[in-house]
Amino acid sequence: MGYSMQLNQKTREGRSTGTGTSVPLHHRQVASFRNSGDPVLSVDAKKKELVGPFKNGGRTWRPQGKPHRVNVHDFPSLAEGKAITLRAYEIGDEPGGGQRRCDA
């Protein structure tokens, strides 16, 4: 019948603001900081994650037959709070915008 199992294809983008001024301003600010000898940092904020015994995609080495025990459901009311993971990078002078990770 002409049907097949297919994944979604990311091709749609949101509307443009039409101003187009933020990128040149950003480049001027970066150049200004570099010329004065100040570092230029890029901060990458990841998604919020629940804190507590919740399932995640990671794996750890554990004694055989002794896995971490986690909640069956990820209800926010069972969380001890939320954590926002951050990474900071110092933008380098290398072509292609080389970055060096800054561990805090």
Image (tube, rainbow, N blue to C red):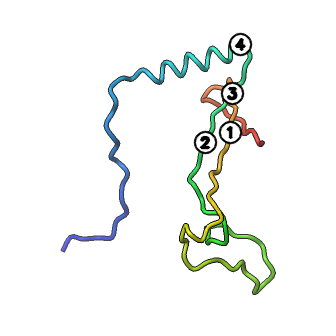
Q: What is the residue that sits farthest to the bottom in this orientation?
A: 65
The percent position of residue 68, horizontal first and vertical second, equals 72, 77
Image quadrant in which the N terminus is located = bottom left
Q: Residue at x 61, y 78 (%)?
A: 71
**Label 2: element kind:** strand
Q: How many marks?
A: 4
Image-based side of 75 in relation to 52, left or right: left
Q: Given this view, does label 3 or label 4 mark the residue nearer the observer?
A: 4
Image-based side of 7 in relation to 38, left or right: left
Judging by the rendered image, the residue that carries numbered circle 2 is: 44
Judging by the rendered image, the residue that carries numbered circle 4 is: 36
Judging by the rendered image, the residue that carries numbered circle 1 is: 88
| C-alpha gap between disc 4 and disc 1 | 20 Å
Kindly indicate the quadrant of the structure image that contains residue 39.
top right
Judging by the rendered image, the residue that carries numbered circle 3 is: 92
**Label 1: element kind:** strand
Kindly indicate the quadrant of the structure image that contains residue 54.
bottom right
Query: Which disc is residue 74 wearing?
Result: none
Q: Residues within 10 Å of mark 3 (few under 14, many from 20)?
A: some
Observer-nearest of 95 and 84? 84
Q: Given this view, does label 1 or label 3 mark the residue nearer the observer?
A: 1
| C-alpha gap between disc 3 and disc 4 | 14 Å
Q: Given this view, does label 3 or label 2 mark the residue nearer the observer?
A: 2
Image quadrant in which the C terminus is located = top right
Q: Is residue 12 above or below residue 28?
A: below
Q: What is the residue that sits farthest to the right in this orientation?
A: 63
| C-alpha gap between disc 1 and disc 3 | 13 Å
